[in-house]
Image (cartoon, helix red, strand yellow):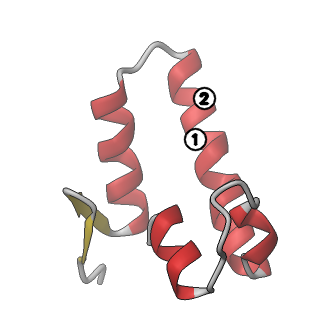
Amino acid sequence: MTAKQIRESRNINKKSDLTRDYLTEPELKIVDEAETIVTALTALGFKQDYIKYQLEVKYGKLLDGGNDKVLLNK
């Protein structure tokens, strides 16, 4: 789910409100982990497309123009 989708689904009116404040504990853990991965891969010199791909693989989603497509990870 994108930040925009979270704001809409949880009736967060102001874009300036921190979306993190509305996340559950498990959701916050995923965000923190993803941020750590992005930081590490950026520090290693990987480009945005590669980082995005790695996150999609890790979290089982392919983002296609803002539409989430869930893959079955078995």
At x 46%, y 74%, the residue is 5
The circle drawn on residue 54 is none
Q: Amino acid at mark 2?
A: Ala
Place of residue 17 in the rendered image (x, y in percent of width and height, measured from the top left): 75, 61
Determine whether label 2 and label 1 are within 8 Å by CB.
yes
| Residue at the image point whose x is 58% and y is 17% from the top | 43
**Which is nearer the eye, 14 or 72?**
14
Q: Which quadrant of the figure contains the N terminus?
A: bottom left
Distance between the alpha carbons at the discs numbered 2 and 1: 5 Å
| Residue 40 image point, x, y percent | 60, 29
Residue beneath label 1, please?
37
- Residue beneath disc 2: 40
Q: Is residue 1 left or right of residue 3?
A: left
Neighbourhood count class around disc 1 (C-alpha, 10 Å): few under 14, some 14–19, many 20 upward:
some
Q: Residue at x 51, y 28 (%)?
A: 41
Mark 2: which secondary structure? Answer: helix
Give percent across and percent down for residue 46. Answer: 40, 20
Q: Which corner quadrant of the image does residue 30 belong to? A: bottom right
User: As drawn, which residue projects farthest toward the top?
Assistant: 45
Image quadrant in which you'd find residue 48: top left
Taking the image as shown, residue 58 lies to the left or right of residue 41, namely left
Q: Residues within 10 Å of mark 2 (few under 14, many from 20)?
A: few
Residue 36's place in the image compared with 6, above or below, is above
Front residue (pair 69, 2): 2
